[in-house]
Structures are given as structure tokens and as C-alpha cells.
């Protein structure tokens, strides 16, 4: 049987165990709280650290509003050459890039059947003329009537007319150039079937060129005759070509919802026929506009830097160019603005600026 001393000793031991556990639990909570505070402090520091941005200032200069389009180079007065008859192509006499004179043969069609027809008609003409000669001789001698005379004369005339028509048609089997110039395009090969609806050649003067641009119907009200056009092509990097709008077609294409605009390149501009161009037609110009990078403005707002913090400002914009935007109102004088505001930038955020 345990003594009173043993009972007291056991009770003290149990109390000490419970106290030790309590201290350990309390210490664990304290450590967790410290860690949580450290994480929160780190997160606060991370969110409050300065954001690196590139600064810039507005500049004053000319601003151009342009209508973008795509176009291609073509002869100013191209001539499409097609056959007047339907027949297989036998021989080609010219190729692309070759200069031709008016009346020069371009292609020959299969005329075997036509030549056989001419031979038959020629034989009929000779027979009719022989009959005509005999009958006229008999008529002069009084052995043939006037009706017989008229009949053979008419028959001979009809035979000669039929033969002449067949020989004239034979000329259509040789297709000739209708004007002097250069063969700009050839769309035919030997063995193809030539028809009146199929273009075989395009002839034009490569020195007289134009650019035909396709403009969206929403932009066509801003395009005027005489407007300057600035053109470029991947084939000629770092070069631009200028011209003037001289025609806006009155009728558009309802399928493409677009209009054709004709542009005359400036004197001295030489471009190959068929070249594709990016075309910017100037629709408005302001000489002394307040300009900022286009990327700095989003939805009529931009960011400026004041006392090391980002501040958003509402602005009214004007002409919007390819990489610059005109600011009409809302930008403080000599303000340092953020050229490319980063995503998630907030009002009052601390920033480190380079460039202003």
C-alpha cells in the first residue's frame, strides 16, 4: 500500500508533465506567430518595393493620321489580250518582260480546220466563177436568159464573199498586240484552250505605273484625292515610297466591304509590276502636336510619376499614329510619364524611373 509521501510525489510528477506540455504548446504558437509575421512583413515589403519603369517626356512635332491599306503595283493603262475565237493554243511568240510593237504576233491558235474550210470554199469559188464565165458568154451570144445570167453572177459573188470571210477569220487564229509596250504577264501555255473570256497576256508601259490599294469601307470617308500616300514593301526594307491619291472608285466591293483607291507614285519611283505594298494614306496632319508614345496611352489614360509614385491621369487624345499619339488635354507640363506601364500598376505605387 503506497504511503502518503508516494501519493504526493506522484501528483507532483503529473503536474510537472502537464506544465511541460503547456509550455511546449505555447512556445509552438509563439514560433508560428513569429513566422506568420515574418511572412506578412516579407509580402508587404515585396508589394511595396519600387517598380522599375521607363520614363519619357512629351515632345512637340508633326502628327499624321493615316488610313492603312494594302496595295499592289500595276500598269496605269493595262491592256488585257484575249482571243476572239475558241481554239487550242499551238505556239507562243513572246514571253514576260519582252517588249512588243503594235500588230506583233503574240500567239498562234490551231487553224487546221479553218485552212481546210478555206480550201473547200476556194474550190467552190473557182467552180462558181467558171459557171459564171460560161453563162455570161452564152448570154452575150443570145443563148442564155437574163435570169440565168443573174443567178450565176449572184452565186459567184456569194462564193467569193464566203471565201473572203473565211480568210479574214483565219487572221483571228494569230493573236497580235494591240499597242506597243511590254508583256507584263503571260497566262497561257501551248495546249491551253483560248476563249474570248480568258486573258492570255497583259501588256502595258512599265514606266507608267500606279498603285491600287484596297481600303476598308469604314475608312473611305477619310480618304481624299490628292492625299499623300507613304508606301513600303518587305522587298525593299528600310525604304519608303511616296505618291498621291488620284482616284477613289465610286463603287465598292460589297463582299470585301472595301473600295479601291488609285495612287500615282512620285516621279522617279520605280517599282516592279505586281509588287505588294503596305500603304498609309495621310488623312490629317498637325504641325505642332504634343506627342507621347502610343504604348503610354490606354483607354484615354496614362501614368505619370510624381515624387517617386505612379499617378494615373485622364487625357484627351487627338491624332493616333503608328507609334505616337497626340495629347490634346490632361497632361501636366514637363510631366515624366511612364512609356510602357506594366500590368497591375496601381495608383500611388512606388516606382524607380529611368529616362526622365
Image (tube, grey):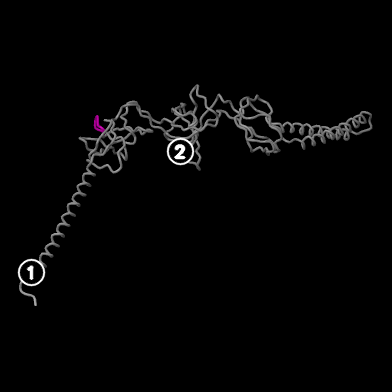
* Residue 335 covered by magenta stretch: yes
**Residue at label 2?**
216
2 or 1: mark nearer the eye: 1
Q: Are marks 2 and 1 in contact (CB under 8 Å)?
A: no
Q: Residues within 10 Å of mark 1 (few under 14, many from 20)?
A: few
Is residue 100 among the parts visible in the rendering? Answer: yes
The percent coordinates of residue 215 (x first, y second) are 46, 36
Q: Which region shows up in magenta? A: 331-336
Q: CA distance from mark 2 to mark 1?
A: 99 Å
| Quadrant occupied by the C terminus | top left
Left or right: 172, with 250 as reference point: right
The percent coordinates of residue 221 (x first, y second) are 43, 35
**Residue nearer the viewer, 152 or 90:** 90
The percent coordinates of residue 196 (x first, y second) are 66, 37
Q: Quadrant of residue 136?
A: top right
At mark 1, the secondary structure is: helix
Kindly identify the residue that appears in the image at 41 percent across and 30 percent down.
Answer: 282
Left or right: 336, with 286 as reference point: left
Left or right: 336, with 123 as reference point: left
**Earlier sequence position, callout 2 versus callout 1:** 1
Q: Quadrant of residue 183?
A: top right
* Residue 294 covered by magenta stretch: no
Q: Is residue 62 above or below residue 317?
A: above
Q: Quadrant of residue 87?
A: top right
At mark 2, the secondary structure is: strand
| Quadrant occupied by the N terminus | bottom left
Q: Main secondary structure of the magenta part?
A: loop
Residue 9 is labelled as: 1
The percent coordinates of residue 48 (x first, y second) are 22, 43
Question: How many marks are shown on the rendered structure?
Answer: 2
Left or right: 124, with 313 as reference point: right
Kindly identify the residue that appears in the image at 8 percent across and 75 percent down.
Answer: 2
Amino acid at each position: 500500500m503506497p504511503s502518503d509521501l508516494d501519493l504526493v510525489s506522484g501528483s507532483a510528477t503529473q503536474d510537472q508533465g502537464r506544465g511541460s506540455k503547456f509550455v511546449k504548446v505555447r512556445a509552438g504558437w509563439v514560433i508560428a506567430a513569429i513566422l506568420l509575421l515574418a511572412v506578412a512583413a516579407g509580402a508587404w515589403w515585396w508589394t511595396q518595393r519600387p517598380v522599375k519603369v521607363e520614363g519619357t517626356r512629351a515632345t512637340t512635332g508633326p502628327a499624321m493620321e493615316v488610313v492603312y491599306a494594302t496595295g499592289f503595283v500595276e500598269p496605269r493603262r493595262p491592256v488585257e489580250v484575249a482571243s476572239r475565237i475558241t481554239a487550242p493554243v499551238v505556239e507562243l511568240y513572246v514571253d514576260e518582260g519582252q517588249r512588243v510593237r503594235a500588230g506583233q504576233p503574240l500567239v498562234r491558235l490551231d487553224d487546221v480546220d479553218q485552212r481546210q474550210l478555206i480550201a473547200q470554199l476556194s474550190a467552190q469559188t473557182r467552180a462558181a466563177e467558171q459557171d459564171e464565165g460560161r453563162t455570161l458568154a452564152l448570154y452575150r451570144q443570145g443563148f442564155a436568159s437574163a435570169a440565168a445570167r443573174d443567178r450565176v453572177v449572184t452565186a459567184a459573188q456569194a462564193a467569193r464573199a464566203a471565201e473572203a470571210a473565211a480568210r479574214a477569220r483565219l487572221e483571228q487564229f494569230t493573236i497580235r498586240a494591240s499597242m506597243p509596250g511590254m508583256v507584263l504577264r503571260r497566262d497561257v501555255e501551248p495546249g491551253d484552250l483560248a476563249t474570248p473570256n480568258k486573258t492570255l497576256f497583259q501588256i502595258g508601259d512599265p514606266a507608267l505605273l500606279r498603285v491600287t490599294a484596297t481600303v476598308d469601307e469604314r475608312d473611305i470617308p477619310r480618304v481624299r484625292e490628292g492625299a499623300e500616300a507613304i508606301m513600303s514593301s518587305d522587298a525593299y526594307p528600310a525604304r519608303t515610297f511616296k505618291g498621291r491619291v488620284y482616284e477613289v472608285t465610286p463603287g465598292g466591293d460589297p463582299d470585301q466591304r472595301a473600295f479601291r483607291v488609285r495612287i500615282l507614285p512620285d516621279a522617279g519611283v520605280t517599282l516592279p509590276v505586281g509588287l505588294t505594298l503596305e500603304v498609309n494614306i495621310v488623312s490629317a496632319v498637325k504641325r505642332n502636336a504634343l506627342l507621347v508614345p502610343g504604348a503610354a496611352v490606354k483607354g484615354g489614360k496614362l501614368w505619370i510619376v510624381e515624387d517617386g509614385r505612379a499617378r494615373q491621369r485622364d487625357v484627351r487624345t487627338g491624332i493616333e499614329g503608328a507609334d505616337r499619339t497626340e495629347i490634346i488635354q490632361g497632361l501636366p507640363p514637363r510631366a515624366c510619364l511612364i512609356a510602357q506601364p506594366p500590368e497591375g500598376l496601381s495608383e500611388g505605387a512606388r516606382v524607380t524611373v529611368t529616362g526622365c
